[in-house]
Amino acid sequence: MTTITSSAVRTTTASSSIWRRAVIAGLSASAATSVVAAVAHAAGVSLNINGEPIPVSGFATLTLLFTTVGFGLAVAVRRWAGNPRRTFIRTTVALTALSFLPDLLVSGAAAETRVTLMVTHLVAAAMFIPAIASRLPEGRS
């Protein structure tokens, strides 16, 4: 006979809860960044870097990729950090700030292109970080 401890139930519930939340938040953020890029492009903002266009679908693809990385980070800090929520928020905010560096340093993009790229980073972060942080404990349980 197998017994399930309350700790095992909490871990399973937390895992499925964060997994579902990450999927929903990642897909929502991907859609939102695509909309931001499409609206900016429709308003006349060039989405070209060094003469190469960034497809609107590229925004969704990269957002999905990096929200997957964010999910992995959440799982890791939930397991190893003393305060998973605080650690996740601080780390992801710092990573979001660092994500501006390539946008600022690229030489072959107009200023409005750079701003659009940074806005998409902020939109994705604003949607994903709070959604996942709310599923992380504030301290060891």
Image: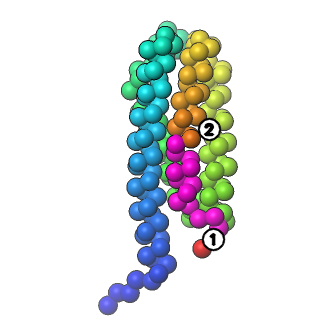
Against 10, residue 128 (above or below) is: above
Which residue lies at the image location 53% right of the left edge and 30% below the top edge?
A: 120
Q: Position of residue 8 (x, y in %)?
A: 45, 77
Against 51, residue 140 (above or below) is: below
Which residue lies at the image location 45% right of the left edge and 33% below the top edge?
A: 32
Which residue lies at the image location 47% right of the left edge and 71% below the top edge?
A: 11
Q: Quadrant of residue 103?
A: top right
Q: Position of residue 88 (x, y in %)?
A: 61, 53
Region of the chain picked out in magenta, as a range = 127-139
Which residue lies at the image location 58% right of the left edge and 34% below the top edge?
A: 122
Q: Amino acid at mark 1?
A: Arg
* Residue 6 shown left or right of residue 97 in the figure: left
Q: Amino acid at mark 2?
A: Thr
Of residue 107 and residue 22, the one placed in the foreground of this image is 22
Q: Position of residue 66 (x, y in %)?
A: 50, 40
Which numbered marker is on residue 96? Answer: 2
Quarter of the image where the C terminus is located: bottom right
Against 22, residue 15 (above or below) is: below
Task: Provide the secondary structure element on which disc 2 rests.
Answer: helix
* Residue 100 shown left or right of residue 8 in the figure: right
Q: Residue under circle 1?
A: 140
Q: Is any part of residue 37 visible from this angle?
A: yes
Residue most toward the bottom? Answer: 1
Q: Are marks 2 and 1 in contact (CB under 8 Å)?
A: no
Q: Residues within 10 Å of mark 1 (few under 14, many from 20)?
A: few
Magenta segment: does it hold 136? yes
Task: Provide the secondary structure element on which disc 1 rests.
Answer: loop
Q: Alpha-carbon distance for marks 2 and 1? A: 26 Å
